[in-house]
Amino acid sequence: MTVTIVGAQLGDEGKGGIVDVYGAAADVVARYQGGDNAGHTVVHEGEEYKLSLVPSGAVRGKVGVLGNGCVVNPATLFGEIDDLREKGLDPDVRVAERAHAILPFHRVLDNVEEDVKSDDDLSAGTTGRGIGPTYEDKVGRRGVRIGDLLDPDVLRRKLEYVVPQKRALIEDVYGVTLSEVDLSFDGFDAEAAFDVDAIYEQYHEYGRRLAEEEMTVNAGAFLADCIDGGETVMFEGAQGTSIDIDHGIYPYVTSSNPTAGGACTGTGLGPTVVGDGEVIGIVKAYLSRVGTGPLPTEMTDDEETLADETRERGGEFGTVTGRPRRIGWLDVPMVRHAARASGFTGIAVNHVDVLAGLDEVKACHAYDLDGETLETMPTTTERWGDCEPQYRTFEGWPDVDWTAVAEEGYDAIPGNARDYLEYVSEEVGAPLYAVGVGPEREETVVLESPL
Ligand code: GDP
Ligand code: IMO
Ligand code: MG
């Protein structure tokens, strides 16, 4: 049995919290794409865990797997594992030997290319973690995989091929003098990030630790064995549908497939396995966005104060980068698009408490594009940017004791909020499984448990 958790919007919908809530009944939690661009938050007993790579099930002591579809920065992974150990947890994380390693030059290239693109308004506002360049090398068949870190000869051979190319790219194409780049991370400065020996030494050491702690696996075989043995596997999507490389607002997207199909290609299990289970779309009751590009329902002009208040109430600052998130009204066509692309069997709507206290709450029901009404997203981002939201207005709901509401259950949620939730569920064509009314584990109203 499997359950797949997918972001229905632009990331940061509260996926980590829902994985934590439903994860109680899971044995294994597996990430299938992305890397340390993700920032998933779990709050339990006042302690806030911010997880970039370690799957969110770690807070409940579940086995975590980073599938082959992930890109893994070993420095982040070990740093996170060590931090969690300091907090008294004992994370058991397995990494797919087929997953790709983020190398230091990927991070430098990510930052440099973003800088260059910003002159033409083409930068995606990336997290700067080297995600795009690593996936480029994977598809270009010149990447270094986690399994390669275990074999010194293969590691060196691959680095000797790829590093000089990257050095030429940064120096000759981008015209960057590495000694002048003010960037350092994970023990690398920009010069060392393009040095075969420096990378080899560090990544060989990472390989040694991975082997010593017996962390590497054939993810597909490992997960299939778990399922065959009667265990329950949860797939934890990172990012969200509208920043999916195929289904998102290209080019302001990430470089992987957060949609449910990614759970197959990114783990080594078939669509029948993923499709046999549930696929739950995680929806934020409004929109938040870190990154660039259009955002038709963004609260701007006379709604700027409301955006600021919502940002403060919802703590809408990037988990990874600390950037203030842009705020908008719920974009229903975006969620309809997500429900189709992943085949949601249910949805969880989070942050209902954050909208409390407003006189009215708006939701973009459809778009007006050149006089035509659209109920789903146009395929080009430029056309999406031209869309004028057609709003439905809902009466606001009061701020209440949300912890008490969560304890009492769905009927204790204020009626106007329930009207809003039922509208969303109806439009998206998927039943409401859970409602988030606060960040704590206990602040989720569970209507349906998929496990
Ligand atoms: P993820 O990337 O989808 O896991 O989401 P993030 O962790 O980046 O961002 C969600 C933020 O909202 C975190 O700080 C969560 O603790 C918090 N959160 C999640 N659900 C709720 C909710 O229902 N209400 C409130 N107020 N906060 C929530
Ligand atoms: P979680 O899992 C929100 C955005 C970046 C940028 C674009 C590309 O916490 O929901 P990247 O570094 O991936 O190449 O950046 O995608 N982005 C996210 N936005 N939540 C995330 O993850 C994100 N991961 C990437 O801001 O616009
Ligand atoms: Mg996040």
Image: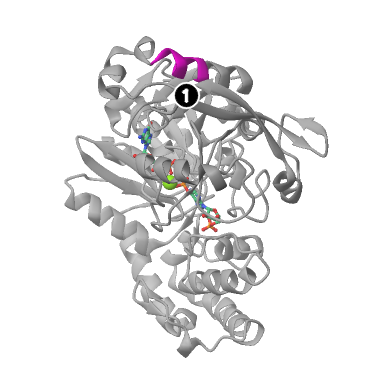
Residue 321 placement (x, y as % from top left):
41, 58
Residue 84 placement (x, y as % from top left):
24, 50
- Residue at 38% x, 62% y is 74
Image color mode = one colour
- Horizontal side of 129 relative to 176 (left or right) equals left
Q: In the picture, which quadrant includes the C terminus?
A: top left
Dot 1, how many residues are within 10 Å of its Cα: few (below 14), some (14-19), or many (20+)? some
- The residue tagged 1 is 1
Q: Magenta stretch: give its range.
A: 414-420
Extreme residue in the front direction:
302
Q: How many marks?
A: 1
Q: Is residue 293 above or below residue 44?
A: below
Q: Is residue 283 above or below residue 35?
A: above
Q: For numbered disc 1, what is the local secondary structure? A: loop
- Residue at 55% x, 73% y is 109
Magenta region, main secondary structure: helix
Residue 134 placement (x, y as % from top left):
55, 63
In the depicted view, which residue is nearer to us: 324 or 37?
Answer: 324
Q: Is residue 57 above or below residue 197?
A: above
In the depicted view, which residue is nearer to us: 211 or 334?
Answer: 334
- Horizontal side of 231 relative to 110 (left or right) equals left
Residue 368 placement (x, y as % from top left):
75, 35
Would you identify the image quadrant in which residue 344 lies?
top right
- Horizontal side of 49 relative to 141 (left or right) equals left
Q: Is residue 126 visible?
A: yes
In the depicted view, which residue is nearer to us: 62 or 425?
Answer: 425
In the depicted view, which residue is nearer to us: 235 or 406?
Answer: 406
76 in the magenta segment: no
Q: Is residue 435 above or below residue 213?
A: above
- Going by the numbered disc 1, the residue's amino acid type is Met
